[in-house]
């Protein structure tokens, strides 16, 4: 297990000692994080690192997940889609599955903590059914730029009971709830298998294991197979790029139990690229493969149509990879256009392809973007920055 001191060489002693000082007053406080999956996607990624580091500071940090049937996750994925702007059939049955699963959670889970942090919509309604004895924070990781009004109105009925909301970017703070809101950026842990430095032999071993040749430049996108990440659009862009530069596309995705639409999106994608050897699709959870792929790619794409924050962008920027990312959600917080990568309109395939081709044709440009990108993450988007923000937020709700 990692300790705060392990990050001294990366963020410096001053930052680490400030966190120790700031956390006085929180010793022994029982903090419960609640979400819907231990694995897959950015929330699980963040909690995997944040919870142990909170414990290292002397808090009693705990992480639980809400258990649900396939039906429940179908409903919550629909709500997730609606929050990101999709139309759904907003039936009484869906609302009933949603609230019933939340009520059932309380029959097997006792909440006697000092602070409760609920991540995303899945466990959001718990607050209505519990005897509330402590501050509750709703931490939203979803892109709320254009929520479906009907579903948003329904969910707000739960949100207004919370003491604080936390969003990834200022753009998602809506004026229609008079709640104390805070911005906390998700962040990456530079010491994990996914993000640490790796040697050439490890790199080559995994490239061989997963059948990824490096004879041509690699363009990659690493994301759950989700319509919001637009994997089919990525292939369409690649087809434009290939007219100019011979290259290879690799799409890597890992399944998440709270995303039941993943298999369908994956199958559609496989159908689209069948019989092609210039597109490699890998459906596998492997942190080391994420690391290797981000390091060997000439360009990392993140062609999301909506994006809460986009940790995959942070991970690629940290490794100095040239990134072409959509100008949506949290991505523009991370990419300064033409400085730390390229920001593009994800619907404009010609524009996306143009930026990729520019990088492929000018390796010096790629190296320049990548160098600034690493520093941007080092300054703002490491787990230590996120921990500091949480310590302040927790102290704020306990006052
Ligand atoms: N991820 C992974 N393997 C994959 C695809 C994604 O480990 O094949 C991880 C990725 O490295 C990142 C997280 O899942 O840490 C995705 O977070 P992001 O914020 O980019 O998107 P989300 O899935 O939460 O919408």
Image (cartoon, rainbow, N blue to C red):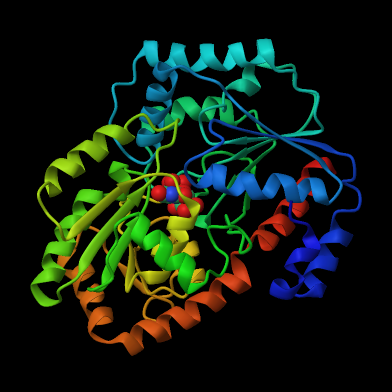
Residue 112: x %, y % from top left: 80, 23
Q: Residue at x 68, y 62 (%)?
A: 385
**Residue 358 in the image: above or below residue 256:** below
**Residue 381 in the image: above or below residue 107:** below
Residue 130: x %, y % from top left: 69, 17
Does residue 310 appear in this view?
A: no
Q: Residue at x 77, y 71 (%)?
A: 8
Residue lying furthest bottom in this view? 364
For this view, does 86 lie left or right of residue 311? left
- Foreground residue among 20 and 333: 20
For this view, does 217 lie left or right of residue 275? right
Q: Residue at x 86, y 39 (%)?
A: 29
Q: Residue at x 34, y 54 (%)?
A: 210
- Foreground residue among 369 and 394: 369
Which quadrant of the view contains residue 303?
bottom left
**Residue 32 in the image: above or below residue 112:** below
Residue 9: x %, y % from top left: 73, 75
- Foreground residue among 270 and 261: 270
* Numbered disc total: 0
Does residue 247 appear in this view?
A: yes
For this view, does 393 lie left or right of residue 239? right
Residue 146: x %, y % from top left: 36, 44
For this view, does 76 lie left or right of residue 107? left
Which of the image's four quarters has the C terminus? Answer: top right
């Amino acid at each position: 297990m990692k300790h705060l001191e392990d990050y001294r060489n990366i963020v410096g002693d001053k930052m680490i000692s400030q966190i120790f000082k700031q956390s006085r007053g929180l010793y022994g406080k029982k903090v419960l994080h609640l979400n819907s999956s231990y694995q897959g996607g950015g929330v699980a990624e963040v909690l995997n690192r944040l919870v142990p580091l909170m414990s290292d500071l002397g808090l009693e940090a705990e992480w639980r997940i809400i258990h649900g049937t396939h039906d429940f996750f179908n409903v919550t994925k629909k709500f997730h889609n609606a929050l990101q702007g999709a139309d759904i059939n907003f039936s009484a049955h869906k609302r009933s599955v949603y609230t019933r699963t939340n009520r059932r959670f309380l029959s097997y889970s006792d909440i006697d903590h000092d602070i409760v942090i609920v991540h995303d919509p899945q466990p959001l309604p718990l607050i209505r059914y519990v005897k509330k004895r402590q501050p509750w924070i709703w931490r939203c990781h979803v892109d709320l730029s254009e929520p479906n009004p009907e579903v948003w109105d329904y969910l707000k009925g739960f949100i207004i009971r919370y003491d604080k909301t936390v969003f990834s970017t200022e753009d998602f703070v809506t004026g229609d709830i008079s709640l104390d809101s805070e911005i906390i950026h998700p962040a990456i842990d530079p010491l994990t298998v996914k993000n640490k430095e790796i040697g050439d032999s490890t790199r080559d071993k995994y490239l061989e294991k997963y059948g990824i040749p490096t004879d041509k430049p690699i363009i990659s996108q690493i994301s759950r197979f989700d319509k919001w990440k637009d994997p089919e659009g990525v292939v369409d862009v690649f087809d434009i790029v290939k007219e100019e530069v011979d290259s290879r596309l690799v799409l890597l995705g890992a399944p998440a139990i709270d995303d039941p639409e993943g298999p369908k999106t994956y199958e559609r994608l496989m159908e689209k690229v069948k019989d092609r050897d210039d597109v490699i699709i890998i459906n596998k959870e492997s942190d080391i493969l994420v690391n290797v792929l981000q390091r060997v790619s000439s360009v990392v794409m993140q062609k999301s149509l909506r994006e809460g924050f986009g940790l995959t962008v942070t991970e690629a920027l940290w490794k100095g990879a040239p990134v072409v990312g959509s100008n949506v959600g949290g991505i523009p917080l991370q990419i300064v256009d033409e400085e730390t990568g390229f920001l593009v309109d994800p619907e404009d395939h010609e524009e996306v392809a143009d930026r990729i081709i520019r990088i492929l044709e000018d390796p010096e440009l790629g190296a320049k973007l990548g160098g600034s990108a690493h520093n941007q993450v080092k300054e703002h988007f490491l787990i230590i920055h996120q921990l500091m923000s949480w310590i302040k937020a927790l102290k704020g709700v306990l006052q």
